[in-house]
Image (spheres, rainbow, N blue to C red):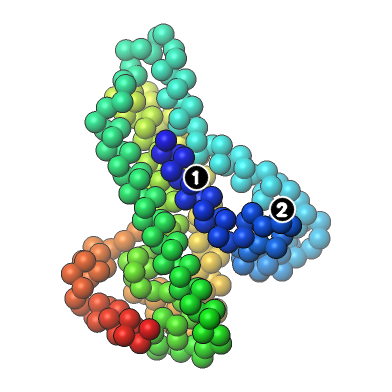
């Protein structure tokens, strides 16, 4: 059920970006692929053969394998529950499971909210046309990128939630076995671990592109953490006070 909720969000996001148009290549492509194909991530990928191999093994094969790996905790729980020798270890749905489920759904909601905030900003930005970007801009449109809402707490809140969702999913193997030592760290951990590694690389590359494109991004990097929120930023957003809160209000007035 939880994976289906996550899948509905992903499917909707894919749909509105043109993922189900025909022919398929008429939809939006992740803008980063063009930079990667030009060799700006790894210079060797600018050559036809390395790019073809990268496309085949990383894009087409590895990422699909990774999707299966992040779902493996469910397989582990089902497998243990089916074994007669594990009947004394595996427990039915429990209060810790319900707590994890609530965290999972909350993360999906936050990720959806972050996606929608970024989507709306990009749509409005496109309508405004070319804007002179300033290093000291207080308006998000003048800065060229979105830094309000959840993006005032984290530079990549949707990336952060996605990683946390599948780490949370792994912990169902822990709650299902009452935290038994032999299952506390099991092989299904490899899925969320590899996903976190993937986001370190993709996040760093995205940051590099944004820093080169937007003059105000360097200050944004100093003010706002990438994946892990600071208590100060959370309190500023909730209370609506402080320097950044005033800047946020000023940006809203300009918008």
Element at badge 1?
A: helix
Residue in the picture at 81% in, 56% down: 49
> Is 43 positioned to the left or the right of 17 in the image?
right
| Residue bearing mark 2 | 54
**Callout 1 environment at 10 Å: few (<14), some (14 to 19), or many (20+)?**
few
In front of the other: 120 or 241: 120
- Looking at the image, residue 70 sits to the left or right of residue 52; the answer is left
The single residue placed furthest to the right in the displayed view is 49
Asked whether residue 157 appears in the rendered view, the answer is no
93 left or right of 209 in image: left
Query: Which residue lies at the image location 68% right of the left edge and 43% below the top edge?
Result: 61
- Residue 127 visible in the shown view: yes
Q: Position of residue 15 (x, y in %)?
A: 57, 56
Q: Secondary structure at mark 2?
A: helix
- Residue 123 point in image, percent of width and height: 51, 73
Q: Quadrant of residue 135?
A: bottom left
Quickly name the residue at label 1.
Answer: 7
């Amino acid at each position: 059920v939880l994976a289906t909720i996550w899948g509905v969000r992903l499917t909707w996001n894919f749909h509105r970006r043109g993922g189900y148009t025909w022919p398929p290549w008429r939809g939006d492509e992740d803008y980063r692929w063009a930079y990667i194909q030009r060799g700006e991530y790894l210079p060797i990928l600018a050559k036809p053969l390395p790019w073809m191999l990268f496309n085949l093994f990383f894009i087409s094969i590895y990422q699909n394998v990774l999707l299966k790996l992040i779902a493996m905790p469910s397989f582990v729980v089902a497998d243990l529950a089916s074994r007669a020798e594990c009947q004394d270890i595996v427990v039915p749905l429990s209060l810790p499971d319900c707590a994890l489920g609530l965290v999972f759904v909350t993360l999906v909601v936050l990720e959806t909210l972050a996606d929608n905030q970024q989507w709306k900003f990009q749509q409005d930005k496109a309508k405004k046309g070319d804007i002179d970007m300033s290093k000291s801009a207080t308006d998000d449109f003048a800065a060229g990128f979105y830094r309000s809402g959840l993006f005032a707490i984290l530079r990549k809140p949707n990336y952060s939630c996605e990683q946390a969702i599948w780490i949370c999913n792994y912990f169902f193997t822990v709650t299902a076995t009452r935290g038994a030592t032999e299952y506390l760290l099991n092989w299904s951990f490899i899925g969320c671990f590899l996903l976190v590694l993937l986001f370190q690389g993709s996040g760093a590359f995205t940051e590099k592109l944004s820093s080169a494109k937007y003059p105000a991004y360097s200050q944004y990097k100093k003010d706002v953490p990438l994946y892990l929120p600071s208590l100060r930023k959370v309190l500023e957003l909730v209370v609506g006070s402080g320097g950044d809160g005033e800047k946020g209000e000023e940006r809203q007035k300009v918008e």
